[in-house]
């Protein structure tokens, strides 16, 4: 731990020294820029690329589910990237146990969304069929 702090302090002073010299000497500044240029152009990591989606940008999955067959709905969902599917799951609170957090397979996420929407759509249907059978007995 102590060595890490010492190393951080040393590197901070070195960067300060390089910055001061680059400010005084334009040739040195150009050489330093050329040396550090490959670091600036490296691709962004997945965490840096991650952009949080706004709720108003999310599609209305309940409307689409009611307007399409199960197969068509699955194909429609396959047009969205995994990040959007995860945001849909999180927004609609489909995964309270957070089982899908580490899932990377788009098809698995799509199937999970379809199952959750279908179970929510059928949630009250058991009571409706029970009520109809009671009316038939009268």
Image (cartoon, helix red, strand yellow):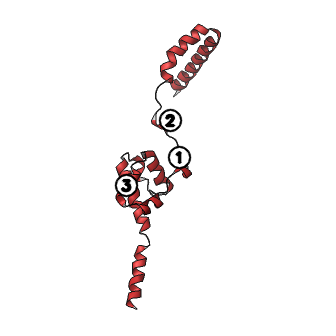
Q: Is residue 45 above or below residue 96?
A: above
Is 57 left or right of 116, judged from the image as shown?
Answer: right
Tell me the mark number nearer the camera, choosing from 2 and 1.
1
Q: Measured from the top left, where is residue 30 in percent x and y?
A: 56, 12
> For mark 1, what is the residue?
53
* Residue at image coords 40%, 64%: 118
Question: What label sits on residue 74 in the rendered view?
Answer: 3
Vertical placement of residue 120 versus 48, above or below: below
User: Which label was assigned to residue 48?
Assistant: 2
Q: Residues within 10 Å of mark 2 (few under 14, many from 20)?
A: few
Query: Disc 2 versus disc 3: distance between alpha carbons?
Result: 29 Å
Q: Residue at x 51, y 18 (%)?
A: 36
Q: Is residue 125 above or below residue 3?
A: below
**Badge number at residue 100:** none
Task: Name the mark nearer the viewer: 1 or 3.
Answer: 3
Splitting the image into 4 quarters, where does residue 130 fall? bottom left
Q: CA distance from mark 2 to mark 1?
A: 14 Å
Dot 2 or dot 3, earlier in sequence = 2
Circles 2, 3 touching at the beta carbon (< 8 Å): no
- Quadrant of the rendered image containing residue 70: bottom left
Q: Say which of 48 and 58 sits in front.
A: 58
């Amino acid at each position: 731990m102590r060595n890490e702090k010492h190393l951080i302090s040393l590197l901070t002073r070195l960067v300060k020294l390089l910055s001061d010299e680059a400010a005084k000497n334009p040739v040195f500044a150009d050489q330093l820029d050329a040396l550090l240029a490959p670091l600036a152009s490296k691709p962004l990591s997945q965490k840096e690329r991650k952009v949080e989606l706004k709720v108003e940008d999310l599609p209305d999955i309940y409307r689409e589910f009611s307007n399409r067959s199960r197969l068509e709905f699955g194909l429609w969902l396959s047009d969205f990237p995994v990040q959007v599917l995860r945001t849909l799951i999180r927004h609609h609170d489909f995964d309270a146990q957070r089982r899908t957090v580490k899932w990377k397979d788009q098809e698995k996420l799509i199937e999970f969304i379809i199952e959750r929407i279908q179970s929510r759509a059928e949630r009250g249907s058991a009571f409706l069929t029970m009520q109809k059978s009671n009316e038939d007995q009268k």
